[in-house]
Amino acid sequence: MLYSSLELLALFIVTCSIVVQAWVGIGFGLLAAPLLYLIDPAYVPGPVLVVGWMLSVIVVLKQRHSLNWRRVFPAIAARLPGSWCGALLLVSIAPWQLSLFFGGALLLAVWLSLRRYSVALNGYSLTVAGFLSGILGTATSVGGPPIALLYQHEPRLTARNEIAAFFLIGTPLSIAMLWLNGGSELLNATLILKMIPGVAVGFWLSRRLERVFNKDSARPAILLISTISALVVLWQGITGGLAA
C-alpha cells in the first residue's frame, strides 16, 4: 500500500493519538480529528470514528475478563438515541452552532469538576453522559469527554477499560446513524485502511509506556484532555460562525 507524504503524516498523527487514548481512555478524537481535518476533511467524522473503534476492540479483547459490563450498560443504551440526534443535527443545522453549544457545555463540566462538584457514577449519570457522548461524537468525532468526566475518580485502568467498552458498542451506533441519515459519503474506506497500522503501532507503544509510567489515576489527564477538547470545539464554532 503506497502512501503520499500527507498520508504518512496522517498515519503519524493517528499513531500518537492512539497512544494517548490507549493509556488514558480518551484523546484520540480530540488529537486526531482537528489535525486530520487540516490534511483532508474526508478524515472526519467517519474514518476517525472507525479507527477509534478499532482501538476499543483491541482493549476490550485484552481486558474482557475484568470489565463491568453491567455498570457501563446504561451509557451504551443511551448512546443510540444520542447518536441519532447527533446525526440529525449534523445534517440539519450549521456545525459551528453545535460546536459553540457543546464546547461551552464541556468547559462548564470541567470547571465544575475543578470546583470539586462531582457527579456520582450511577445508572442515571451514565445514561445522561452516554446520550451526550452520542450527540457530540457523531457530530464532531470528539465524544469521549462526557463519559470520561464521570470516570475521573476511578482507577485509570478501570476508566480506560469501561470507556473502551462504551465505545465498542457506541461508536458503531454513531456510524450507523450517519449512514441512515445520508452520511454514507462520510465513510472513506481507503483512508480507513491506510490508518490501521497506526492503531496497531500506537497500542503497542502504549503498552511499553505503561511499563515506564504506570500511574493509577488518570484524573489530571482526563481533565486536561477534556479542557483542550472544549477549547478546540469552541474555536471551531467561533471560526465557523465568523465564516458563515
Image (cartoon, grey):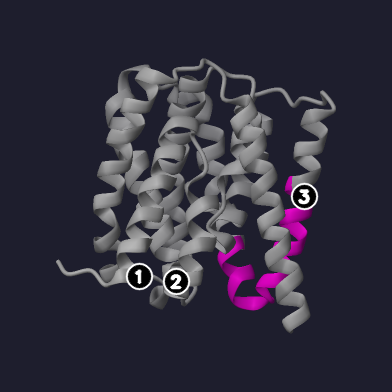
Question: Mark 3 — residue?
Answer: 105
Residue 7 visible at all: yes
Residue 186, image x, y percentages: 42, 73
Which quadrant would the C terminus be assigned to in this image? bottom right
| Residue at the (57%, 25%) spot, across then down | 218
Q: Secondary structure at mark 1?
A: helix
Question: Mark 1 — residue?
Answer: 6
Q: Is residue 230 above or below residue 2?
A: above
Question: Mark 2 — residue?
Answer: 39
Badge 1 vs badge 2, beta-carbon distance below 8 Å: yes
Range of magenta residues: 86-106
Q: Give the crowd class for mark 3: few <14, some 14-19, many >=20 residues within 10 Å.
A: some
Q: Secondary structure at mark 2?
A: helix
Residue 170, image x, y percentages: 46, 46
Q: Amino acid at mark 1?
A: Leu
Magenta run includes residue 83: no
Q: CA distance from mark 1 to mark 3?
A: 34 Å
Residue 73, image x, y percentages: 50, 32
Which quadrant would the N terminus be assigned to in this image? bottom left
Tell us which disc is closer to us: 3 or 2: 2
Name of the residue lying farthest toward the bottom: 244
Q: Amino acid at mark 2?
A: Ile
Q: How many marks?
A: 3
